[in-house]
Image: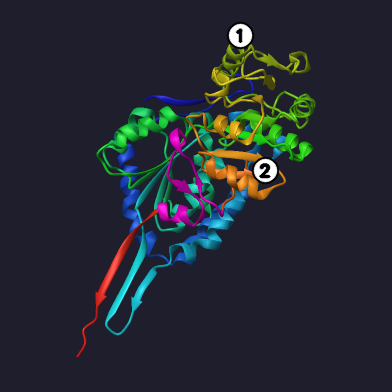
Amino acid sequence: MSMIKCISPVNGEVYAERPAMPLDMAKQVVSRARQAQKTWARRPLDERVNLVLAGVARLNEMVDEVVPELAWQMGRPVRYGGEFKGFNERSNYVATIAADALKPLVIEESDRFERRIAREPHGVVFVVAPWNYPYMTAINTVAPALMAGNTVIIKHASQTILVGERMVRAFVEAGVPADVFQNIFLDHETTAALIAARSFDFVNFTGSVEGGRSIERAAAGTFTGLGLELGGKDPGYVMDDADLDAAVDTLMDGATYNSGQCCCGIERIYVHEKLYDAFVEKSVAWVSNYKLGNPLDPETTLGPMANKRFAATVREQIADAVAKGAKALIDPKLFPADDRGAYLAPQILVNVDHSMAFMREETFGPAVGIMKVKSDSQAIELMNDSQYGLTASLWTRDAERAARIGADIETGTVFMNRADYLDPALCWTGVKETGRGGSLSVIGFQNLTRPKSYHLKKVTA
C-alpha cells in the first residue's frame, strides 16, 4: 500500500503520512455517501444549515491545534492565526442566503396549474482541495453543498494532508452524520479511476491547470459536472490619480502574503508613469521589512514556501528574467534565512516585459514584477495579455473610470482599491485557463444543485 506524505517546509522532514486508499475501499466510501444522501436531503433546510454551522464552530474550538498544524504542513506563520476569519465569514454568509438561494421559482400557482422550478441537490459532491488555503478553499464548496442536501467527500493535497481529516472530525463531532461528510486519502490514479467510473455527481477542483486538465480527461464522457479553479497571474493597475500609499500597502501585501501562495495574489503590477518611481521606491521599503524565518516563531512575518520545489520555480523565473534584462531590487542580505530551499526571500523586479516567463507564467511565490505604462489602453492590453483571468485590481479615485476599464478586462472579478480578497456575496469565478464554474453567492448554490421543473395540472370538476 502506497503512502501519501507531507514533507514539512519547516525542516524538510516527513510531518504526516497516511496510506492511500485502494480503489475497492474508495468505492465503499462513495457507496456510503450515496446511500446517506437522500436521507440527508430530506432533513429540513434549517436543520442542515445549523449542523454545518455547528461543524464550523467545532473547528474554531480546535484553533490551538489547527494553527501550528498549518505552519508545519505548508509554512504559514502562526502569528496570522490560521484561516478562521475567511472560513467563518464564508460559512456564515452562505447560511444567511441558503433559503432564498434554494427556494423554488414559482411560475404559476392557480386553481388549474402549479408550475415551478425547484433546486435539487446533485447527490455526491467530490471536493479536491489545494494546500495554499486548505480550509477556506474547501469551505467554499463544502458548506453550500451540504446545506443544499448533497453529501460530500473531500480529498486534500498531500501537502496539507491533515486538513480534510480535521474538518470531517469537527463536523461529525458537531452532529453531521459520518456518511454525509467523509475524508479520503487517494493517489492520482485512484482519483482518476473514481471520476471516470462516474462515482460522483459533481466534482470541484482547485489547483493547477494541469491538474484541471487531468480532472477533465478523467470525467470525459461521464457528463459529470465540474467546477475548476486553476492558475492565475493576477494584475494590479495603479492609475495616475491613485492613493499611492494605500496602493503600495495593499498590492505588496497581495503579492507577498502567505509567501505569495494565494489564488488571487498579485503577480504583476502596471503603474502609470507619473507615479511609477514613487511606487517602486515605497514598495521596496515595504517588502524589505519582512522577517523571513521559522513559521512557528511568533516574530516571523514570512514563512517558507510550502515545498522547496515551489521555491525552485520562483528562483528559476527570477533568474531567467534577470538574464533577459530585469533588475532585482530587494537585497538578499536582508534575508539571511533564505536557504536556497523552501525558505525564499521576497523580490521585486523592474525592467520587466512580457517576453519573460516571470510576467506571463504563474509564479505563486513572494515575487512581483512592476512595469511602467503611459495610458489606460496600454494597461488594459497588458493585463489581458495572459492565459489566465481570476481577478484584477484597479487603483483610482474615479469609480466610473474603473468600471469602464473593468469591462474591458478578461477576468472573473474586478477590484477597485483592494486586492486579494474573496467576497462571499459575489461569485468566485475565472476565465480562460483559470477555469470554469463558480462558487459562493447565490450562483454557487445554483452550481451545486440542478433545476427540476414541476408542471402539475390539477383535476377540476
What secondary structure is marked by label 2? loop
Q: Position of residue 192 (x, y in %)?
A: 33, 32
**Labels in figure, total:** 2
Residue 235 falls in image quadrant: top right
Q: Please name whichever residue, 387 or 274, is drawn nearer the observer in this view of the structure.
A: 274
Q: In this view of the protein, which residue sits in the foreground, 408 or 142?
A: 408
Above/below status of 299 relative to 407: above
Q: Specify the farthest residue to the top.
A: 323
The label on residue 323 is 1
Neighbor class of circle 1 (other Cα within 10 Å; few <14, some 14-19, many 20+) is: few
User: In the visual, does 339 lie left or right of 433?
Assistant: right
Residue 441 lies in the magenta-colored region: yes
Occupied quadrant, residue 271: top right
Residue 241 inside the magenta-drawn segment: no
Task: Please tell me which residue is depicted at 44% across the width and 30% down the height of the picture.
Answer: 209
The chosen color scheme is: rainbow
Q: Which mark is residue 353?
A: none
Please provide percent x and percent y for residue 69. Answer: 61, 34
Residue 66 position within the rendered picture, expressed as x and y whole percent measured from the top left = 62, 40
Q: Amino acid at mark 2?
A: Arg
Q: Is residue 69 visible?
A: no
Q: Residue 418 bears which disc, if any? A: 2
Is residue 439 found left or right of 9 in the rendered image?
left
Magenta-highlighted residues: 425-447
- Image position of 119 with respect to 11: above or below: below
Residue 357 picture quarter = top right
First in sequence: mark 2 or mark 1? 1
Q: Look at the image and tell me in which quarter the C terminus lies.
A: bottom left
Seen as rendered, the residue at the extreme bottom is 461
